[in-house]
Image (tube, rainbow, N blue to C red):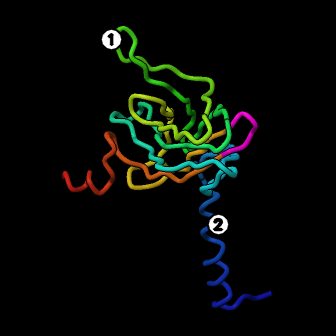
Amino acid sequence: MRLNTKTALLFVTLCAPMALAACGSDAPEPVETEIVDVPAAADAPEGVSLTDAQVRMPAVSGRPGVAYFTIASETPRTIVAASVLGAGRSEIHETNMVDGKMTMAPVESIELQPGEALNFQPGGYHVMLFDMDATIAPGGSADVTITFEDGDKASIQAPVTGAGGMDHSAMEDMN
């Protein structure tokens, strides 16, 4: 069988990149990623309100970030976990004053009282975010999910700010 010039050129054009890619490739093996079951939509069980969410980046790279929000429920509920998509680990913490010193410690659960809003804020309850990946950056957003004792979850999309609550545009204005 004899190939004409156009057919040969087409063959070389299509096959050469594949041959070169396979030759001496130092490409790393694909890494298997874990699928995390965290709802991305802002949703909550009936009677639960999750609002005013914010994720703050750490002042020093590699240190933990933090998430704040306000949550309320029409019925008694117990919060047992909080997570942020893109954080390797999340812990609910509480800040207290002990012997004139500010202390912070993880908490296992928090009881929500019917009709009372609970603010996760500086100086009180907050969610510490460890091992944050590059998908979380000032000016973007991150999904915050609260898990209740009965397995129900409430989620909200939170804007991501720089350390001290500065947003991306404010940080650019300082330059």
| Coordinates of residue 55 in the picture (x, y in percent) | 45, 44
Identify the residue at image location x=39%, y=28%: 123
Q: Secondary structure at mark 1?
A: loop
Could you tell me how far apart the alpha carbons at marks 2 and 1 are, in whole angstroms? 68 Å
| Coordinates of residue 24 in the picture (x, y in percent) | 59, 52
| Coordinates of residue 116 in the picture (x, y in percent) | 55, 39
- Hey, what amino acid is under mark 2? Met
Q: Can you tell which quarter of the image residue 97 is in?
A: top left
Would you place residue 42 above or below residue 11 in this image?
Answer: above
- The reply, left or right, for residue 125 in relation to residue 33 is left
Q: Can you tell which quarter of the image residue 145 is in?
A: top right
Q: Which residue is mark 2?
A: 18
Q: Marks 2 and 1: which is nearer the front?
A: 1
- Visible in this render: residue 32? no
Identify the residue at image location x=68%, y=45%: 153
Task: Magenta stretch: give its range.
Answer: 148-153
Magenta span includes 150: yes
Q: Which residue is mark 1?
A: 100
In front here: 9 or 130? 130
- Hey, what amino acid is under mark 1? Gly
Q: Main secondary structure of the magenta part?
A: loop
Would you place residue 95 above or below residue 13 in this image?
Answer: above
